[in-house]
Amino acid sequence: MSIYHQPWRLVQNQIRGRGGREIDKFRGIDPPKDTPHGSEAWIGSTTHVEYPPEDRPYYGCSEVELPDGRRTYLFQAILEAPEEVLGEKHMAVNGTDIGVLVKYLDAQEQYGLQCHPTREWAMEKWGQTHGKAESWYVLGTRDDTEEPAYILLGFKEGVTREIFEKYYRAGDIAGLESLCHRIPVEPGDSFFLGGGVPHALGEGCFVIEVQEPQDLTLMWMNYELAHGFLKEGVTEEEYDDRTLGAFIYDGCSYEENLRRWKTPHDVMRSGPWGREEMIVGPRHTTYFSFSEITLDGETEITETGFPRIGIVSEGSGKLLWDGGEMSVSRGDEIFFPAVVSGLSVSGQLHLVLCHPEGAQG
């Protein structure tokens, strides 16, 4: 059987940021621990971080264990036979890139207030084809934080660029955060974060993040504070223009903010085996989507003609396809080439399926 017509097991990783204990717990690693560089895992990634270390140019890119026993970067495996792995429909929309970026984020401490550019802003200011719309699906929360888990998301009503810029120029992070809604979260909650919306993952949150395949982040920091992190040649005027212009100043009430960004889970199909729900999909964005199968029994995995990334978020079981099978359990990460004949899943488990732009999940 061709290696391009069966699922591939992804190699687990952890990168940058303080945290990681909840990722370890999720993966069954004992003892779980926080580290200075472990708060994120990039899953099925063909995207490297915006500023990779000189000695690690592919930092952020995922490795894969191929069915023929080889271990290599996923993007290298794809380039061996892109049409077989990705399919014609995918390549017409996304080229040889996966077209979606999936992560775990584990916030031992609150992330910095930030936003990401829309596609239009990313093209105008960076010449990039992707912005960074993204989404969060809360897998768990820490039980030892000083306060219950929360996120910052969306400007409050009446916030203008002038108000934001006053705190930005002063380097007043508390003032900037006060302009945003603070939302308590619990496992099972999900949110879509459009380009330009301010946000910060709060202390104690452990989430799956699904987003456009891009690593452009605009932080709250003014030029003086951010200067040491910037590429050479970026002027203060250019930096301020990119940053202040990336935020979209259209604040609203707390209730309207939740209606905008908190996502309902729409049932796509169901039966005696369980159900599949769309967590983030076409009603929120056309750039990516992801669904979750809640299973007690066996069901087919709907073909889309596109590749996808799967995460077993709970339980255990088997993936089955014509000519093969694979045992899976919580924490396993799988890459599915575009064409895997007779693909189904059995057991008692939850399976999150992440789809690129163009796929009808």
Image (tube, rainbow, N blue to C red):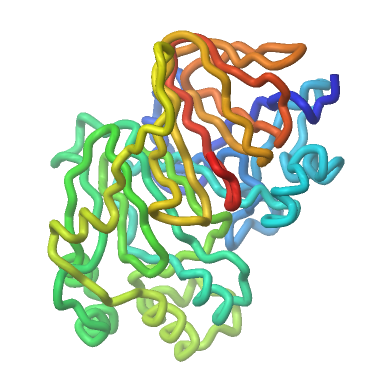
| Residue at 46% in and 77% down | 227
| Residue found 39% across the figure and 61% down from its top | 194
Residue 63 visible in this rendered orientation of the protein: yes
Above or below 15: residue 218: below
Judge by depth and name the residue closer to the eye, 295 or 123: 295
Q: Is residue 178 above or below residue 234?
A: above
Residue 14 vertical position relative to residue 269 in the rendered view, above or below: below
Of residues 205 and 275, the one drawn nearer to the viewer in this rendering: 275
Quarter of the rendering containing residue 338? top right
The outermost residue toward the bottom is 237
Instruction: Tell me residue 5's x, y (percent).
Output: 77, 27
Residue in front for this viewpoint, 27 or 145: 27
Position above or below: 265 against 244: above
The one of 71 and 189 positioned closer to us in this rendering: 189
With 123 as the anchor, is 209 left or right in this view? left
Query: At which x and y percent is residue 222?
Result: 36, 78
Residue at 64%, 56% in the rendered image: 53
